[in-house]
Amino acid sequence: MDAAAPILVFDSGVGGLSVLAELRKALPAAPVIYAADNGGLPYGTKSEAEIAARVCGLLGRMSERFRPRLICIACNTASTIALGMVRDVLAVPIVGTVPAIKPAAAITRSGTIGLLGTAATIRQGYVDRLAAEFAGDKVLLRHAAGELVGAAEGKLRGQPLDPGVIARAVAGLRSQPGGTAIDTVVLACTHFPLLRDELAAGFGGDVAMIDGAAGIARRIAHLTRDQAFAPTAPDFALFTRADADPDALLPALRHYGIARIEVLQ
Ligand code: DGL
């Protein structure tokens, strides 16, 4: 294994940075490429076929060009739809992101869990299977909160957050039958932990916000435990389309250890 080979962290936009933050804690010396299919954002409103084709095609091109040691699909929408297909076509180890229903089921006291995801994620059979396997004796209420994706993208570019977006996400779960009993919310889209404080305030202080980022970082650390890391250049972001306002985004990227943006050719 080339010690300079990167870990490629992939999302449709900036959401995967919530996973990268945990990965930095677990593996501070690991070279990383932060890849965002911003040309395809948002994934959550697209069809399964469209998402699968984009994710398989892009990860194929990116791995041929950059030879990552491991790919992390830091996107619940892409993972719940295309993880199996990507593993079938690429020889590189792939770590996916799946809704953190198992840890949520372990901590809920009321037995009612809320799940916020994109429209594409919450309709997946993958989510039904996780719910049946780990939360069969709980109530799991789902809400498609795709509006939060744009809000998180805006927040990282320094734009003001519309409080109505948070209020609508909260109401989408609370207004369902039994929704007042929710004491644990699964943030089943990697963009949503970027709004954790705002969502936690919206639900009220006693409601726990759970996501899978720390578990994903632990899994990557385990899979690379015998490998050496020796970066030869600063980490960069790889976008599928030039960002409209890179100067607004770069300060946030730098906070996650990303020095510059490159556009996939
Ligand atoms: N960050 C992605 C996820 O975890 C989806 C955002 C989008 O709709 O593109 O589901």
Image (cartoon, rainbow, N blue to C red):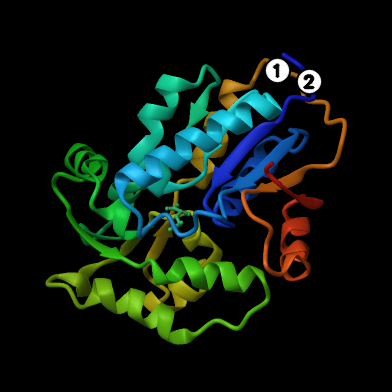
Quarter of the rendered image showing ligand 1: bottom left
Front residue of 90/104: it is 90
152 horizontally vs 260: left or right: left
> Residue at coordinates 63% horizontally, 54% vertically from top-left?
241
Mark 2 residue type: Ala
- Identify the residue position indicated by label 1 in the image: 227
On the image, which quarter does residue 255 sit in? bottom right
* Image-based side of 102 in relation to 218, left or right: left
Residue 23 quadrant: top right
Q: In the depicted view, which residue is nearer to us: 192 or 62?
A: 62
- Residue at the spot 72% in from the left edge and 63% down from the top edge: 252
| Element carrying mark 1 | loop
Q: CA distance from mark 1 to mark 2?
A: 7 Å
Report which residue position mark 2 lands on: 3
Amino acid tagged 1: Gln
Left or right: where does residue 19 sit relative to residue 112? right
Q: Residues within 10 Å of mark 2 (few under 14, many from 20)?
A: some
**Chain-order first, disc 1 or disc 2:** 2
- Position in image of residue 166 (x %, y %): 42, 78
Q: Against 157, is 184 above or below?
A: above
Mark 1 neighbour density, 10 Å: few (under 14) some (14–19) many (20 or more): few
Residue occupying the point 42% across, 74% down: 205
Say whether residue 128 is visible. Answer: yes
User: Does the beta carbon at disc 1 come under 8 Å from ligand 1?
Assistant: no
Q: Are marks 1 and 2 in contact (CB under 8 Å)?
A: yes
Above-or-below relation of 199 to 69:
below
Nearest to viewer (mark 1 / mark 2): 2
The spot of residue 256 in percent (x, y) is 72, 53
- Name the spot of residue 147 as percent of width and height, x first: 41, 72
Quarter of the image for residue 24 reads top right
Q: Give above or below for 172 relative to 37.
A: below
